[in-house]
Image: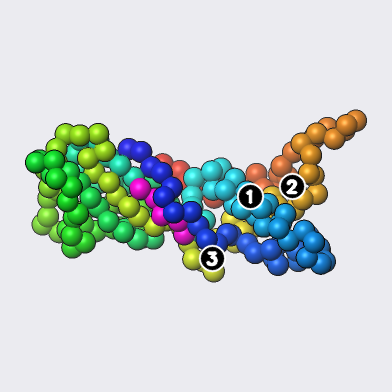
Amino acid sequence: MKTKLTTAPTEYAVSVCEVKDHCRIDGTDEDTYLANLIQQATEFIQRATGMQLTKATYTQTVEDKFPTEFRLDWPPAYSVTSIQYYDTDGVLQTLAADQYYLDNNGLIGIIEPAYDVTWPSTRALPNSVVVTYIAGYDVADIPLAAKRAVLFTVAHWYEHREAVTVGMSGAELPMAVQNLIYQLMVSEVI
């Protein structure tokens, strides 16, 4: 399976105002810089944990045929936009929404055939099945640990703008951030 981001998030885990409150920054001179740090920190935390914090759209492709179940790569799964596949004649089809079920009650989203439905046959082509789905939380529902990890990372990067300071060792990511990332990491065994 291959997964790619098709529509990036339009919101991030924390706002510039939240960062300014956390870092005790007054004025608006550095708002653009802080917004860039928020985006980078959010992306960093997402890669480190394996989860999508704010809503984004992904496409996930499967080769040859439908699997027994789809495990969506970027949790939490919010909704399925479409499932398309190449039928045995090589014609692109869209599977009706009543033909599958998204189990998004756990962290990992799983798509299964609906009750008494079997997956259609496909042509044996690379990327013969394409699932488009939305992953991530509403901003208000992002776990507090994830918000804190982003805030602490932004604050650290704001304070330590250089990787290495002459005459001093570089400042590593604070242990608090590392612990929060560890708590949030998506495990294959869920």
Report the side of 11 relative to 153 (left or right): left
Q: How did the renderer colour the structure? A: rainbow
Asked if residue 189 can be seen in this view, the reply is: no
Mark 1 is surrounded, within 10 Å at the Cα level, by few (under 14), some (14 to 19) or many (20 or more) other residues, namely many
Q: Tag 1: residue type?
A: Ala
Tell me where residue 138 appears, x and y as whole percent.
49, 66
Inspect the magenta stretch and tell me whether residue 181 lies in it.
no
Answer above or below: position of 97 versus 126: below
| Residue at screen point 63% across, 49% down | 41
Could you give the CA–CA distance between mark 3 and mark 1, rounded to whole angstroms? 15 Å
Tell me where residue 177 appears, x and y as whole percent.
67, 48
Report the side of 118 relative to 67 (left or right): left
Could you give the CA–CA distance between mark 1 and mark 2, rounded to whole angstroms? 9 Å
| Residue at screen point 44% across, 54% down | 7
Which residue in the protein does label 2 denote? 157
Which residue in the protein does label 3 denote? 139
Q: Quadrant of the N terminus?
A: top left
| Residue at screen point 49% across, 50% down | 51
- Residue 41's disc is 1
Sequence order check: which comes first, mark 1 or mark 2? 1
Tell me where the magenta segment starts and ends, as one range. Answer: 55-59
Q: Tag 3: residue type?
A: Val
Determine the secondary structure under disc 1: helix
Q: Tag 2: residue type?
A: Trp
Query: Foreground: 132 or 154?
Result: 132
